[in-house]
Image (cartoon, coloured by chain):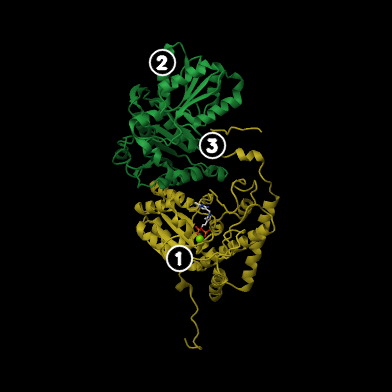
Amino acid sequence: MAANQTVAKPSLKQIGLSEDTLWGLYYYLMKTRLLDERFRKMFRQGRYAGTYFSAVGQEACTVGAVYGLRDEDIIGPSHREIGAAVTKGIPIKEMVAQVFARSTSVDKGKTHPCHYGSRAKGVINPASTVAGQTVVATGCAMAFKIQKKDNIAVAFFGEGATARGGWHEALNYAGIHKLPILFVCQNNLWAESVPARLQGAIEKFSDRAKAYGFPGVTIDGNDVVEVHKTAQEAIKRARAGEGPTFIECMTYRWYGHSEIDPADYRSQEELDTWKKKDPIPRHEKLLTDLGILTPQKREALVEEIDQEIDEAVKFAEESKYAEPEEAYRDVYSENFPVRRDEY
Amino acid sequence: MKNTTYIEAITSALYEEMERDESVFMIGEDIGLYGGVFKATKGLQKRFGEERVIDSPISEAYIVGGCVGAAMVGMRPVPEIQFADFITPSMDQIIQQAAKIRYRSGGQWTCPMTVRVCCGGEVGGGLYHSQINEQWFFSQPGLIVVMPSTPYDAKGLLKSAIRGEDPVIYFEHKRLYRSVKEEIPEDDFTVPIGKAAIRREGKDITVVAYGLMCHKSMEAANILEKEGVTVELIDMRSLLPWDREMIFESVKKTSRAVLVQENTKTGGVMAEVSASITEEIFDYLDAPVTRVCGLDVPMLPFAPPLEHYFLPNAEKIVRAVRKVLEY
Ligand SMILES: Cc1ncc(C[n+]2csc(CCOP(=O)(O)OP(=O)(O)O)c2C)c(N)n1
Ligand SMILES: [Mg+2]
């Protein structure tokens, strides 16, 4: 390219998304990132127990796929889907209360940090079992088909999860019955300390979709526009009864598997390369080029989100832990009271 | 009233519940076109269609896990596990999803699902077609576990399970499918979960059993009666939760208890019943609580003499009762 040639600015038309959507994606990327970094900071400050699973660096995969879903659509998340919870509309207050294990969390402090869920917002409160919610979300899609509803399900999992047996059974079934579901793999190259090459002898995990009889694509998971457009296409197919799609999003987690993992199994070089592909500045550049984003607007947005997070943290920290008696609740429906033992 | 076998009772409960509530559906191996390997679902696909009586691939994890998801969004699934032996691939979904979704979501999500599990020995099924494995589920709060021994209970408990709001593991004993028959009402009825039944009143000793072992215990009671011993026979029916009150009341009255369980002894349901009796009503006992169980070896070896040796039967129960009475 000649030095004096100017690069054509992108147009909304070329991108194929509205200004509202591009801004909406940005909003949730920022919200996810700022909340995630805040959680990390608060963990280091010892303000809550357990550990924390950061998804910093991976936000575009979840935000792009979830943005625009309806409340009745179901998300089957695992442990690294903060972006899905935020974008599906779970209030930040509820999410902080969950991490802080307080009585104001919907789970009343029964699961450990990052297990966000909400029936109202259609997010399955996850079990920690890797690939667990992939199976359950497929069952939601099976129900939608029987009920003749056009709701869909979106199952999220890491590349490590694709090695599990139940995961295979779910995708196999979804293919046979053309269920309305998206299988979104966040391939961040690592499953704790184990590299992706030790999870399967294939280059692209999306190739697995062939075996199940539905389309699979591998995309740049750090490009929120690409993720969103790919997901929208798949959602359209799913709602129209044309069956599942496997979307493998190539991405990278910046920090350890959880906050207690120094992640010294991977090279600095690898980390540096991926940090340069940060999904947020990339989307910001696009928005700036389109004239949608200015430094002032960015600042105002950060301030607005930070304030919401501050309030949520205050809410959570001022919330009490549940009374010990809470341990006995929600084991069964009210038909079966749990027997109490006194010691 | 209608003379009905245990398996007919199951089929008719399924039929009536599917007729009554369109959110009820079934999924399992060979249950559709074929009507199930034991024919428990015979005719159901023809009546209700392929979308509500689904022939699944051989995918136990999906059969159960998918039903958990379906139950969470408004369905009342009745998955079938063809043999209790092959429930292992679905353990993850039963224990981590079904049993805990209500708890881990603070009661937001629920799982009204009934897993039908075909189980049990004395059918020449050998090591991989005779298992029950009820003890694995018995120790999991969040699950309901039942095992009927009569056609009436088979129908009534299945209806209660399907209409309830909790995940139920419903064990149906294949030895009983066609070997027990009784008059049952043609009108709708249910059997409450969590309640045992006194099958025979007596004053000398309490025998507690469930499933096939109720019938073995009844045989034993008949033999003992001739010796002048009256047995109070309690059919647990529900294992989780189990009817502590009824069992304790009976043992308080008789002061002696023999507990009969088809499965291996160690870590079984009767270990808990025994421990609870000694823990809570020790003062009433005149003799050690005694168990008659399957052997502590893998359940169960195939060759007929080995199978026979493994399983509790009337003679073994009679011997145990005599010993407890002589104590
Ligand atoms: C069935 C199961 N095995 C092991 C674990 C422990 N564990 C939690 S996350 C994880 C790695 C998951 O890797 P991947 O699926 O790639 O997701 P990522 O953490 O990279 O987002 C492991 C081994 C678990 N939670 N569940
Ligand atoms: Mg990974």
Q: Pointer 3 indicates a residue of which chain?
A: A
Residue A217, can we see it?
yes
- Inter-mark Cα distance, 2 to 1: 76 Å
Drawing shade for chain B: green
Amino acid at circle 2: Ile
| Element marked by disc 3 | loop
Nearest-to-viewer mark from 1 and 3: 3
Amino acid at circle 3: Ser
| Element marked by disc 2 | helix
Q: Is residue B197 above or below residue A137?
A: above
Q: Quadrant of the N terminus of chain B?
A: top left
Comes first in the chain, label 1 or label 3: 1
Drawing shade for chain A: yellow
Residue beneath label 3, please?
A: A333
Q: Are marks 2 and 1 on the same chain?
A: no
Within 10 angstroms of label 3, few (less than 14), some, or many (20 or more) residues? Answer: some
Number of marks drawn = 3
Q: Which mark is residue A229?
A: 1
- Inter-mark Cα distance, 1 to 3: 42 Å
Q: x%, y% of residue A184?
A: 46, 59
For the point 45% across and 73% down, the residue is A14
Amino acid at circle 1: Lys
Q: Pointer 2 indicates a residue of which chain?
A: B
Nearest-to-viewer mark from 2 and 1: 2
Q: Is the CB of the residue bearing disc 1 within 8 angstroms of ligand 1?
A: no
Residue beneath label 2, please?
A: B223
Q: x%, y% of residue B24?
A: 40, 39
